[in-house]
Structure formats: C-alpha cells, structure tokens
Image (cartoon, rainbow, N blue to C red):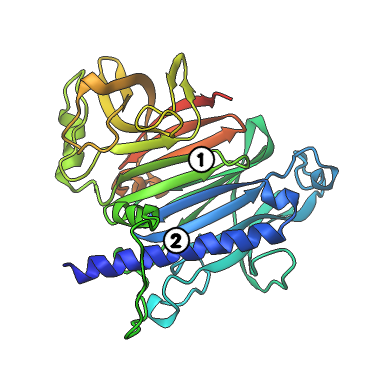
C-alpha cells in the first residue's frame, strides 16, 4: 500500500462529494439566469478550480454602456462568474488568501464572486468573497485585465480556462466584441494536496452496490489532469492528459524526431483522451457518441498527434485507454488537420517554452469550439461544431 497515494485518493473523494453537495445547494437558491451557466473545471495535480459563468446577453440594455466599443466615458460593473477552489490560488498577482492545506479542513472549498469593471478603456477583475449575489461580499482585491477587440462578436459571455503548465492556467473571456485574459495559478509546489484530518475509530460502511464513479475518477486523477466544460444545457466535454510531461523529459524530444505519417508516442504516460456528450463535427468528419460501451454513452476517444507531409494532424482513436506507446491505426476513427503555431519566445512568451503538455476544449460560441493541445512553445488546434 502507498499511504501518500491513498491519502490523495481520500482527499479527492472528499472534494468530489463536497463539490456535488455544494452544487445541489447552489442550484436550489439561484435564479434562472444563474442556472443557465457554463461550468469550467480544471484539475492540476489534484488541485481543482471551478468557474461558473452565467449566460449574460451582450444585447441586454443594462450592459450597453459597459460593452460600448467607443471611448465615450463608458463604465460599468457586473458580476460575471462564481469561482470555487480547493487549494491556495492566485489570479494574476492577486493572492486570494486561501489558507495552507494543513491549516484548513480537508478538501474544503473556498468560493469567490468575480466582477468585471470598466473605467473608460481600463478593464479590471474584482474578486469578492461570498457564494452568491445574496450574500454580503468582502472585496479581496482587483487586478487589471489584458483587453482586446475581436472581429467576431460573442452574443453571450463565454470563457475558457486552459492549463498553461503544471501549476498555471489562462483565464480568457469573450463578450460582444471584447476579449479579456489573465493568468491564474496554484502557488503551492505540485503534489502538496490538502491533508485529511485523521479520526480514530470512524469508518464508512459500504454495500456491494455502492457508486464507484468517484473512486474511479480519483484513481484517474492520481496520474492525469483534466479540463472540463459543461454548457448551460448540461452538455459536457472533457479532456484528460498525463501529468508531468515536461519539456525536459524524453517524450518531448520525440517531437523533433517523429517521422512523416507517424504519431508521437509517449513513454511516460497514457494517451490523451477526449470525452463528449454530443457528436462533434470537425469539418466533414464526425466524432460520434457511443463509440465505446453502450449506444447512448458519451463519446470517448484517444487523441494522437501525427506528423503529416504538410503539417500536423490530430488522430482520434476508438481506444481511449491505451498507453502512450500503443497506437493501433486499425481503431482510428478520424484524422483531422490541425493548425500549428509556435510562440515567439520573446519577452513574457519565454515562459511558454517550459509548458508541460496539456489539452482543453475551448468554446468559441454556443455551438462551436476548438480542441487545443499545448506543449512547450508548440500549440495545435482544430475547430469543431456541435451536432444538435
């Protein structure tokens, strides 16, 4: 038995139960707008951050001044998200003041409200304590946002939370013609999970029919990270990828040596995985649900990166649980052209060179998004639409 591993599994199970009960409570006390929220969940080394973003319309008259595209003295303030974390956490350089794991209840969840503020062309993110709009908030602090303009308007507020390394992530928001971004991170060294208080003589009785889904997930998270998006209608997308595939490891070196028409094999981890509740169209190719297991089960695919003569491809395979060296082309379901980009590695972008492997689903609209793969300075992406 490995006591450290067992302790981590217990911590994750406790957090999953706590988050589930918290979700039930929140749902019973929120209005229709809050219920129609997109849920973003990122797990990095057993540390979890959950962001719930309501479906705020850009056409709502109450947001017209805030989202004005002209510098006409526009201003405003609106609550845009609910944030929940189970470990010390920072937004940009703003420390949210969450206690160290040994100083707080095991797997406890800290909740914050996020608000978007504007003064002329200056944009900021305000962080306040409190689990809902009905509670009395206490301002934790405010941090500046990186602002940009898009040629394509987002009719409702949408966001993404993508891993940017083993401890860092990038929060991106789009609303109307505006885009905002800021870095977020877990400042604790990897592997320091919240400690569970030991209670002597307390046991948990289980029948043979107990639900093992949380245990299975905890086992998976002991070796992999996850990035999940849940749309307002309940549609769920998840990417799962191995931990600690750093640029200093032997697997990263395979990128430069992989031959044309061959996949990048990973020795130190399982294959990347995509799960989807609905069929996804990547151009003229479709990733369907029910490809493994029951006909009405979600789609589950192993994801492989393949070198092509004129670039790169993403290969989706019907064996989602294979090891990173066990690609079997017989089970390939689709090969999709991937856009490739490389960071310039200048100024702040130098940090990109050290990013561990990560994958994510990023929604770019109500029915379309991107599958994104990042490793060091390298980035691959492919667009998809949801088949309704």
Determine whether the residue tagged by mark 2 lies in a helix, strand or loop. Answer: helix
Please state which of residues 309 and 190 is positioned toward the viewer in this rendering: 190
Residue at the image point whose x is 36% and y is 55% from the top: 212
Q: Which mark is residue 259?
A: none
Residue 185, position as x, y percentages in the image: 43, 59
Residue 66, compared with residue 383, is above or below; it is below
Q: Is residue 126 visible?
A: no
Residue 178, position as x, y percentages in the image: 66, 40
The residues tagged by marks 2 and 1 sit, at their Cα atoms, a distance apart of: 17 Å
Residue at the image point whose x is 44% and y is 24% from the top: 288
Left or right relative to 230: residue 224: left
**Quadrant hosting residue 143:** bottom right
Residue at mark 1? 236
Question: Dot 1 surroundings within 10 Å: few (below 14), some, or many (20 or more)?
Answer: some
Residue at mark 2? 16
Please state which of residues 294 and 143 is positioned toward the viewer in this rendering: 294
Residue farthest to the front? 208
Determine whether the residue tagged by mark 1 lies in a helix, strand or loop. Answer: strand
Please state which of residues 143 and 80 is positioned toward the viewer in this rendering: 80
Left or right relative to 158: residue 185: left
**Quadrant hosting residue 304:** top left
Residue farthest to the right? 61
Q: Quadrant of the N terminus?
A: bottom left
Residue 278, compared with residue 74, is above or below; it is above
Question: Dot 2 surroundings within 10 Å: few (below 14), some, or many (20 or more)?
Answer: some
Q: Is residue 282 visible?
A: yes
Residue at the image point whose x is 17% and y is 47% from the top: 249
- Counting residues from the start of the chain, the first of labels 2 and 1 encountered is 2
Residue 112, position as x, y percentages in the image: 60, 65
């Amino acid at each position: 038995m490995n006591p450290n591993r067992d302790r981590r599994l217990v911590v994750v199970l406790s957090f999953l139960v706590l988050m589930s009960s918290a979700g039930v409570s929140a749902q019973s006390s929120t209005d229709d707008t809050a219920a129609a929220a997109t849920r973003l969940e990122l797990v990095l080394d057993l540390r979890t951050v959950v962001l719930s973003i309501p479906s705020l319309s850009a056409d709502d008259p109450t947001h017209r001044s805030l989202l004005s595209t002209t510098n006409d003295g526009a201003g405003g303030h609106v609550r845009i998200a609910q944030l929940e974390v189970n470990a010390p956490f920072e937004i940009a350089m703003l420390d949210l003041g969450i206690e160290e794991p040994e100083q707080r209840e095991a797997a406890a969840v800290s909740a914050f409200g996020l608000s978007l503020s504007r003064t002329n062309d200056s944009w900021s993110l305000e962080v306040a304590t409190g689990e809902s709009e009905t509670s009395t908030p206490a301002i934790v602090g405010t941090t500046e946002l990186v602002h940009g303009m898009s040629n394509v308007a987002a009719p409702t507020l949408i966001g993404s939370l993508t891993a940017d390394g083993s401890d860092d992530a990038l929060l991106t928001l789009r609303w109307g013609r505006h885009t905002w971004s800021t870095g977020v991170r877990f400042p604790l060294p990897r592997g320091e999970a919240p400690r569970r208080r030991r209670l002597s003589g307390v046991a948990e009785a289980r029948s043979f029919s107990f639900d093992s889904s949380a245990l299975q997930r905890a086992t998976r998270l002991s070796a992999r990270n996850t990035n999940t998006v849940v749309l307002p209608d309940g549609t769920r997308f998840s990417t799962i990828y191995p931990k600690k595939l750093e640029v200093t490891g032997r697997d990263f070196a395979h990128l430069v040596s992989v031959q044309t028409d061959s996949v990048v094999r990973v020795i130190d981890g399982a294959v990347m995985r995509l799960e989807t509740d609905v069929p996804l169209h990547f151009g003229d190719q479709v990733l369907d649900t029910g490809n493994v297991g029951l006909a009405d089960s979600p789609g589950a695919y192993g994801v492989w990166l393949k070198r092509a003569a004129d670039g790169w491809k993403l290969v989706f395979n019907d064996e989602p649980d294979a090891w990173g060296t066990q690609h079997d082309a017989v089970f390939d379901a689709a090969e999709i052209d991937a856009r490739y980009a490389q960071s310039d590695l200048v100024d702040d972008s130098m940090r990109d060179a050290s990013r561990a492997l990560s994958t994510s689903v990023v929604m770019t609209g109500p029915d379309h998004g991107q599958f994104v793969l990042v490793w060091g300075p390298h980035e691959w992406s492919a667009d998809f639409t949801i088949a309704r």
